[in-house]
Image (cartoon, rainbow, N blue to C red):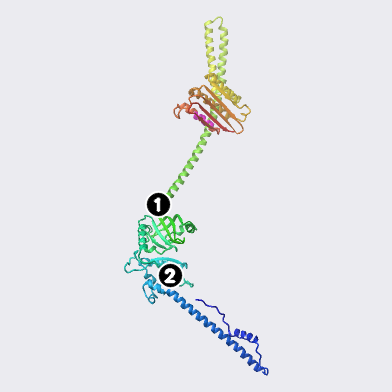
Amino acid sequence: MITRSRPELDPSQLREIAERAAASLPLQPPPDADSDRLKQWHELQVSQIELDMQQQALAELQSERDEAETMRLRYAELYDQAPAGYVSLDQQGRITRANLAAAELLQRARDELIGLGFEQFLAPQTQAGLRRFLAELFESGQRAVLEAPLFDPAAPDGSAAQRRLRIEANLDVEMSACRMILTDMGTPDLRDAARLRAMRVLDSINEAVLVCDAGHNIVAVNHAFTVMTGYPVEEALGRNPRFLGRQEAHPPGYHAAAMLQLCSAGAWQGDVFNRRRDGTPYVAHMSLSVMRDDDSATIYFIGVFSDVTAQREAEAAQRRWSEELDARVAARTAELTESREQLRQLAEHLETVKEEERKRIARDIHDELGQNLLALRIDLSMLSARTSVQHGLLHQRVNAAMENVDATIRSVRGIMNELRPPVLDLGLQAALEWQAAEFRKRTGLACELALPGEDALAGVSVELATVLFRAVQEALSNVRRHAAARRVDITLLADAQGLVLSVADDGVGMRPRGARGGDDSFGLIGMRQRVVAQGGRLEITSPADGGCRLTLSFDL
């Protein structure tokens, strides 16, 4: 209906307008009129104008009323003759108005519908859903859609053979009444048979399934849904799926982000925190998808979900165990690292003590035993000179004793060299040259030595020089005892960044780990400990075709 807004004029305003209109008229008063007659003549003119204005306003008002009545009759005719059913409900769900199509759908005379509860025309299993639907509608004020079967006395249990209504509902301007558009979804036909088959398929699925219309109201659930949630079909239909969830358990914006992805991408999946009908919380992994028509309009939202509470609890327990294990491993690793560092420091200390002890023993042998042997050698030499003429037999015995003393002196000198070669005090280069010469003399094998020169070795500490010397000593001892080699190459490279020592032979190569005797492996273990104690690295390589290379690396 169309209405015009007309400003209301009080008598003083009407009089003022009439006065201005009279003043603008070209009429002249009678020439012989006195002042009283002039006033009467003016009042008559103004009153006539006021009367004309009132008559014009009445005519316009009558025209508007006629137009409004015509529009009302036209609206009433359109309302009554509309092909869709129109009904209006109050907040208690009672019908306050209905058109002819609604009366035909509900199979009652239109006058009989007024005052009746609308839910009685729906199947019993959906009446509770309708009440929730109306309550949410009056609370939110948002347009909503619901599909529900009509009550059929021949099928009171609400079977799939009943006729179904599509209900589109919104509130009037005053938000006090509900207006519904009812669309007949048809009587049982092939489509309903397909719906029945689809429901049977859904019921055969072990996962819970719910179907919502475009207004986010549940229109179908399967048997697994009822088993998982505890809600029977009649309590679920017509409700928003939010009633299943524990909203407080989700982070802020979780559902909004899920709906945004669902509407844009057409699918979403993730975990949701739900609560069963008895209040028991559970975790569901849900997959949502959108069904659209040929015009890309949303028809249904389909959700498939399963109870993953036990799985998520197991995963959480596994994460806790993993974190606890990681913490234990980290603590154990720290302990092992600390123990390794302590062992390294102990090995370094023991090596230092051992070298000092070797030096002391070598010095004591030199100072005590060496001096005594030298004095004995001098005495025997003098005795040999005095007995050479008159005491031949004694002279022979003295010479034999001198030879024994000389052999003992050589042995003592060898022992001192093994303990602490004096040549070490002359520098690393001199010590390695002496070591190579001794090896060549004792074994007869070729031993090539490549050294960088004294200047390059100036930054090598005494401790590191001792480690390098002992490593070459141990390596040459292993070559002599096990390698069956013909040649040994000793190479020492040094620069500002580091130092690399390698000892390579052309022998039979290394045997498998553990095949060699304990003494040999302990020698390599001791060598590695000495190298690690100085912050170095030891590597042993043995190609398949024979030979072996021992490499020591140190950062300077």
Give the mark, 2 or 1, whose residue is nearer the N terminus: 2
The answer to whether 362 appears left or right of 278 in the picture is right
Place of residue 369 in the rendered image (x, y in percent of width and height, measured from the top left): 55, 19
The residue furthest right is: 31
Q: Nearer the viewer, residue 391 or 474?
A: 474
Q: Secondary structure at mark 2?
A: strand
Place of residue 60 in the rendered image (x, y in percent of width and height, measured from the top left): 54, 82
- The residue wearing badge 2 is 181
Q: Amino acid at mark 1?
A: Ala
**Label 2 vs label 1: CA separation?**
46 Å
Identified at 52% across, 83% down, the residue is 62
Q: Nearer the viewer, residue 11 or 297?
A: 297
Place of residue 100 in the rendered image (x, y in percent of width and height, measured from the top left): 40, 74
The residue furthest top is: 390
Identified at 38% across, 63% down, the residue is 235
The answer to whether 219 appears left or right of 397 in the picture is left
For residue 343, say whether it is visible. yes
Q: Is residue 382 magenta?
A: no
Q: Nearer the viewer, residue 97 or 360?
A: 97
Identified at 41% across, 49% down, the residue is 314
Place of residue 388 in the rendered image (x, y in percent of width and height, measured from the top left): 56, 6
- The residue wearing badge 1 is 310
Identified at 60% across, 84% down, the residue is 13
| Residue 206: quadrant of the picture | bottom left
- Confirm or deny contact between disc 2 and disc 1 (CB under 8 A): no
Q: Most prominent secondary structure in the magenta stretch?
A: helix
Q: Is residue 433 above or below residue 150?
A: above
Magenta highlight range: 524-531
Label 2 crowding class (10 Å Cα cut-off): few <14, some 14-19, many 20+? some
Q: Secondary structure at mark 1?
A: helix
Q: Amino acid at mark 2?
A: Ile
Quarter of the picture containing the C terminus is top right
